């Protein structure tokens, strides 16, 4: 599913919970890639509210602790309202 499309089409009517990639990014990404992924997700779903940052479902056994920490650190840094200026190139597609 494409987060930017979901937010554009349904963001006025729905709130979104989760969505962070637990299959590839969280278990196999570097902490920096995970921070970038978290920021992109917040940039897409966060504007105008209606987003609760979380993994797409429960953490799996193959996830490294430092990656979980990087994900939640990024959420704390980038996901507080009011949000900062979006940096994802896709955030413009939402409007």
Image (tube, grey):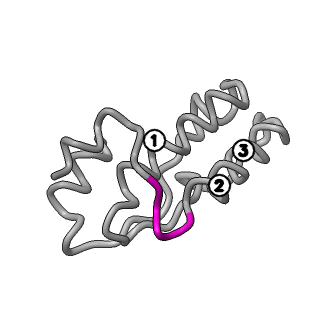
Q: Residue at x 71, y 25 (%)?
A: 30
Which numbered marker is on residue 77? 2
Q: Dot 1: within a 10 Å radius of its alpha carbon, few (fewer than 14), some, or many (20 or more) residues?
A: many
- Which comes sooner in the sequence, label 3 or label 1? 1
Element type at mark 2: helix
Disc nearer the start of the sequence (3/2):
3
77 or 62: nearer the eye? 77
Farthest residue in the front direction? 85
- Taking the spot 53% from the left edge, 37% from the top edge, the residue there is 37
Horizontal side of 52 relative to 32 (left or right) equals: left
Q: Which residues are magenta?
A: 80-84
Quadrant in which the N terminus is drawn:
top left
Disc 3 target residue: 60
Is label 3 or label 2 in front?
2
- Give x and y (percent) for residue 23: 57, 34
Q: What residue did someone put label 1 on?
A: 40
Please give the name of the residue rendered at 32% of the width and 46% of the height, measured from the top-left corner. 3
Q: Secondary structure at mark 3?
A: loop
Q: Earlier in the sequence, mark 1 or mark 2?
A: 1
> For the residues carrying marks 3 and 1, which lies nearer the camera in this image?
1
Task: Using the numbered discs, state the Cα–Cα distance from disc 1 to disc 2 in whole angstroms.
Answer: 13 Å
Q: Classify mark 3: residues with Cα within 10 Å, few (<14), some (14-19) or many (20+).
A: few
The residues tagged by marks 3 and 1 sit, at their Cα atoms, a distance apart of 22 Å
């Amino acid at each position: 599913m494409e987060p930017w499309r979901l937010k554009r089409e349904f963001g006025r009517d729905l709130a979104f919970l989760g969505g962070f990639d637990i299959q590839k990014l969280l278990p196999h990404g570097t902490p920096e890639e995970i921070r970038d992924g978290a920021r992109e997700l917040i940039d897409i779903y966060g504007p105008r509210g209606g987003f609760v940052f979380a993994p797409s479902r429960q953490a799996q056994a193959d996830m490294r602790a430092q990656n979980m920490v990087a994900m939640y650190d990024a959420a704390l840094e980038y996901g507080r309202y009011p949000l900062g200026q979006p940096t994802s190139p896709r955030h413009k597609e939402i409007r």
